[in-house]
């Protein structure tokens, strides 16, 4: 197994054990690949949930640009809901896991079809 496969296994474990959901491995793999080289960078691979600028980046670059959603309070609510599901006390909130949950939340799996 390569480094990316190890990371995908780690993300699947987080989804199962920290978020209480059974991951769709095909979608999780596509979302992880979609994150690009960021998954290999310790800082870029996680979402700093306490930083408003970081949450704005998730909203703008992922939800609006990647998933094609229009800006609305629903986007902020969805981000807050996903981070709450992941656990506010969880130090490492992996970007691929957050993006996966947001993709599922909005039913945008087709973007990765």
Image (tube, helix red, strand yellow):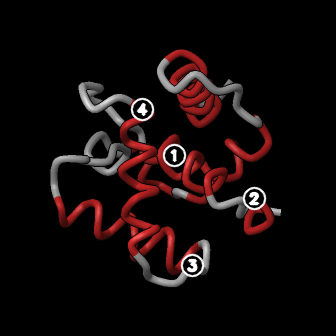
Q: Earlier in the sequence, mark 3 or mark 2?
A: 3
SS for tag 1? helix
* Distance between the alpha carbons at the discs numbered 3 and 1: 18 Å
The single residue placed furthest to the top in the displayed view is 17
Q: Residues within 10 Å of mark 1 (few under 14, many from 20)?
A: many
SS for tag 4? helix
Per the image, the residue denoted by label 2 is 109
SS for tag 3? loop
Per the image, the residue denoted by label 1 is 96
* Distance between the alpha carbons at the discs numbered 3 and 2: 13 Å
The image shows residue 4, relative to residue 37, as above or below, that is above
* Distance between the alpha carbons at the discs numbered 1 and 4: 12 Å
Q: Earlier in the sequence, mark 4 or mark 3?
A: 3
Per the image, the residue denoted by label 4 is 86
Judge by depth and name the residue closer to the eye, 36 or 49.
49
SS for tag 2? helix
Q: Residues within 10 Å of mark 4 (few under 14, many from 20)?
A: many
Disc ID at residue 69: 3
Q: Earlier in the sequence, mark 1 or mark 2?
A: 1
* Distance between the alpha carbons at the discs numbered 2 and 4: 20 Å
Q: Earlier in the sequence, mark 1 or mark 4?
A: 4
Q: Identify which residue is drawn at 32% across, 48% down.
A: 47
In the image, which is nearer the foreground, mark 1 or mark 2?
A: 2
Q: Residues within 10 Å of mark 2 (few under 14, many from 20)?
A: some
- Give how far across and how far down residue 59 sits, in percent: 40, 69
Number of residue marks: 4
Judge by depth and name the residue closer to the eye, 77 or 42.
77
* Distance between the alpha carbons at the discs numbered 4 and 3: 22 Å
In the picture, which quadrant includes the C terminus? Answer: bottom right
């Amino acid at each position: 197994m390569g480094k990316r496969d190890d990371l995908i296994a780690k993300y699947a474990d987080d989804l199962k054990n920290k978020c209480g959901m059974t991951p769709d491995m095909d979608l999780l793999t596509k979302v992880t690949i979609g994150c690009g080289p960021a998954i290999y960078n310790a800082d870029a691979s996680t979402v700093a949930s306490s930083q408003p600028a970081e949450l704005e980046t998730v909203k703008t670059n992922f939800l609006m640009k990647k998933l094609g959603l229009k800006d609305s309070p629903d986007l902020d609510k969805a981000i807050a809901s996903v981070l709450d599901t992941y656990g506010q006390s969880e130090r490492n909130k992996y970007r691929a896991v957050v993006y996966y949950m947001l993709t599922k939340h909005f039913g945008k799996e087709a973007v990765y079809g």
